[in-house]
Image (cartoon, rainbow, N blue to C red):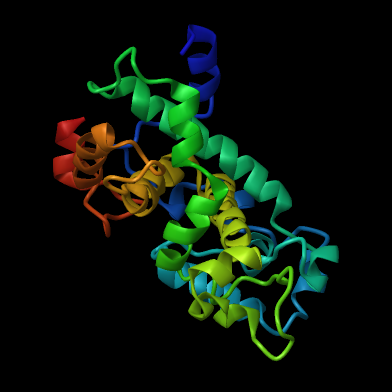
Amino acid sequence: MTGLNFQRAAAVHEHRPRTACSYSTAQLPPAQQNGESSHPQAKILAHLPDLPDLAAHLNRTFSPLQFPPALAARILTHQSHKHAIISSNTRLSFIGRRVLNSYLMMFLHSNPDMTAGFDYEQVAEKTLNTYLLGEFVGPKWGIPSVMKWRPVSLDEKIDPRNALRLGRDVSRSIGLYKVAGTAVEAVVGGVFHQFGGTVSHRLFHTRLLPHILLPGRHDGLHDAFHGHAMKICQQMGGLQGSLVEPDTQGSRSR
């Protein structure tokens, strides 16, 4: 990886505190704490009946973070849904992909097992594939059961939120994994936008990367990096480590 490319990958973090630093919503500037309430679409979104449920789901999944309802709607609404004319996750997923790639590049650059035999771009492509995120991370976050989307082809009598029960082949054929993966990317983009780089970085290492360690498979994070990935995860408190307050052990290890 060239120095220039790494500088670009690290640019997301250069103005942020290090991961071990404390971070809470109380530290956010007023505009961020107020969330999307001042957004011109917020008043329209407020009338959607499922808005509180979307925010409640993200709040439970990523506690103690509190997602503004309008932001939750943006994160969980795919462009295929009728409500996408009001708001969709297209922009947040775009941001999320770049944030994820930056964190992965920094992880690989600091990894003692990263040798000249590995290609950064090839590793990233297999690790952060949108379909892979939708299949292995999306269900862990409960994304398929709450996201708003329209399948490519599915019996109208079947609720899209229950499509995951139809099996892997059907789920892939109707676009479930791609749409769920886009929502995962949007969550990362939304967290970065609302809560900052420190929180989204911890989310990456404790809530996302551990779920794409797929031993023996050609996709997911390469087996050679699994040990380092879990070491960082444990330093940050494990799979349920706090997203806003680092533990003492994690602080000492960094």
Is residue 129 visible to the viewer in this orientation of the structure?
Answer: yes
Farthest bottom residue in view: 157
The x, y position of residue 135, in whole percent, is 48, 60
Residue at image position (45%, 67%) is 139
Q: Is residue 91 left or right of residue 116?
A: right
* Above or below, comparing residue 15 to residue 170 in the picture: above
Is residue 16 visible to the viewer in this orientation of the structure?
Answer: no
The x, y position of residue 7, in whole percent, is 51, 15
Q: Quadrant of the C terminus?
A: top left
Q: What is the total number of numbered labels drawn onto the structure image?
A: 0
* Above or below, comparing residue 53 to residue 123 in the picture: below
Viewer-nearest residue: 116 or 45: 116
Farthest top residue in view: 3
Farthest right residue in view: 85
Residue at image position (65%, 61%) is 71
Viewer-nearest residue: 164 or 81: 164
Residue at image position (36%, 39%) is 221
Viewer-nearest residue: 62 or 161: 161
Q: Quadrant of residue 172?
A: bottom right
Residue at image position (78%, 80%) is 47
The x, y position of residue 249, in whole percent, is 14, 42
Viewer-nearest residue: 47 or 151: 151
Q: Quadrant of residue 37?
A: bottom right
